[in-house]
Image: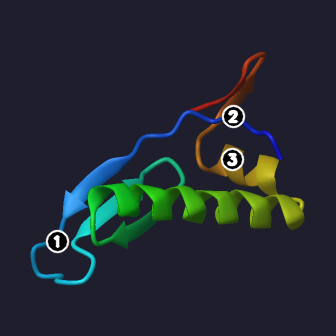
Amino acid sequence: MNTLIPLTVKILVDKRSKDAPFVAFNPELDVASCGPTEEKARQNLKEAVTIFMEETQKQGKLKETLIELGFQKDEHGWIS
């Protein structure tokens, strides 16, 4: 699947967590992941977003889901 969607990544630090204090969050898809470092949290978020997109595509609901999340399709792809 080659769907290009510009996404925001917000990094938060949860000082209460010793094992995975870095939280990477994508507000457009409402997907988050965490890790012991910022880089690992970003990698884990990328994997979580990929799984989300692939599973939604397999269910035949990718377009419907993206529209529900506020995305619009133009000649270049999806925009939020």
Displayed quadrant of residue 55: bottom right
Tell whether label 2 touches label 3 (CB within 8 Å): no
* Residue 62 picture location, percent across and down: 79, 53
Disc marking residue 22: none
Q: Which residue is mark 1?
A: 14
Q: Which residue is mark 3?
A: 66
Q: Identify the mark nearer the N-term, 1 or 3.
A: 1
Q: Name the residue furthest top.
A: 75
Q: Tell which of 14 and 44 is nearer to you.
A: 44
Q: Tell which of 19 and 28 is nearer to you.
A: 19
* Residue 63 picture location, percent across and down: 80, 47
Q: Identify the mark nearer the N-term, 3 or 2.
A: 2
Q: Amino acid at mark 1?
A: Asp
Tell me the CA gap for discs 1 and 2.
Answer: 30 Å
* Residue 51 picture location, percent across and down: 68, 65
- Describe residue 66's horizontal placement relative to residue 69 as left or right: right
Q: Amino acid at mark 3?
A: Leu
Camera-nearest label, 1 or 3: 1
Tell me the CA gap for discs 3 and 2.
Answer: 12 Å
Q: Name the residue furthest left.
A: 15
Tell whether label 2 touches label 1 (CB within 8 Å): no
